[in-house]
Image: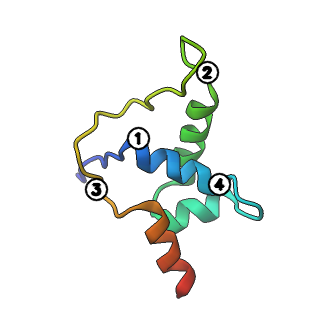
Amino acid sequence: MAKRRRFSAEFKREAVELTRRPQASVSQVAQELGVNANVLSRWRRELAKPSKAGRTPPKLGVRETGSSPRPAVAGRVQRSIRR
């Protein structure tokens, strides 16, 4: 069985921001980043919810490990666009 991948909060925020671009779809961005579209949609919902204090977005349930298992989102998308 494959290990569950963990993504940093920064990766999730950047991925969600990419879905907010004009002409970008969740499924297209998810495919470019190598994540499931359902996971990316869940990250969007979690970031849209106000936190308990109502000021900052939630942490997305991630423990910060210091390094992301994937390259920076913007770099990865740029590479896929160049193909």
Structural crowding at the residue carrying mark 3, measured as other residues with C-alpha within 10 Å and reported as few (<14), some (14–19) or many (≥20):
few
Q: Position of residue 57 (x, y in %)?
A: 54, 28
For marks 1 and 4, the one nearer the N-term is 1
Q: CA distance from mark 4 to mark 2?
A: 19 Å
Circles 4 and 2 in contact, beta carbons < 8 Å: no
The reply, left or right, for residue 26 in relation to residue 7 is right
Q: Position of residue 45 (x, y in %)?
A: 62, 34
Please identify the residue farthest to the front as the structure is shown: 55
What kind of residue is marked 1?
Answer: Ala
For marks 1 and 2, the one nearer the N-term is 1
Q: Quadrant of residue 49?
A: top right
* Label 3 sits on residue: 69
Please identify the residue farthest to the bottom as the structure is shown: 83
Mark 4, secondary structure of its residue: helix
Mark 1, secondary structure of its residue: helix
Q: CA distance from mark 1 to mark 4?
A: 16 Å
Q: Quadrant of residue 27?
A: bottom right
Structural crowding at the residue carrying mark 4, measured as other residues with C-alpha within 10 Å and reported as few (<14), some (14–19) or many (≥20):
some
* Label 4 sits on residue: 19
Q: CA distance from mark 3 to mark 2?
A: 27 Å
**Residue at 23% across, 45% down:** 66
The reply, left or right, for residue 4 in relation to residue 21 is left
The reply, left or right, for residue 12 in relation to residue 8 is right
Please identify the residue farthest to the right as the structure is shown: 23
Q: On screen, 34 above or below 26?
A: below
Q: CA distance from mark 3 to mark 1?
A: 12 Å
For marks 4 and 2, the one nearer the N-term is 4
Residue 50 image label = 2
For marks 4 and 3, the one nearer the N-term is 4
What kind of residue is marked 2?
Answer: Pro
Structural crowding at the residue carrying mark 1, measured as other residues with C-alpha within 10 Å and reported as few (<14), some (14–19) or many (≥20):
some
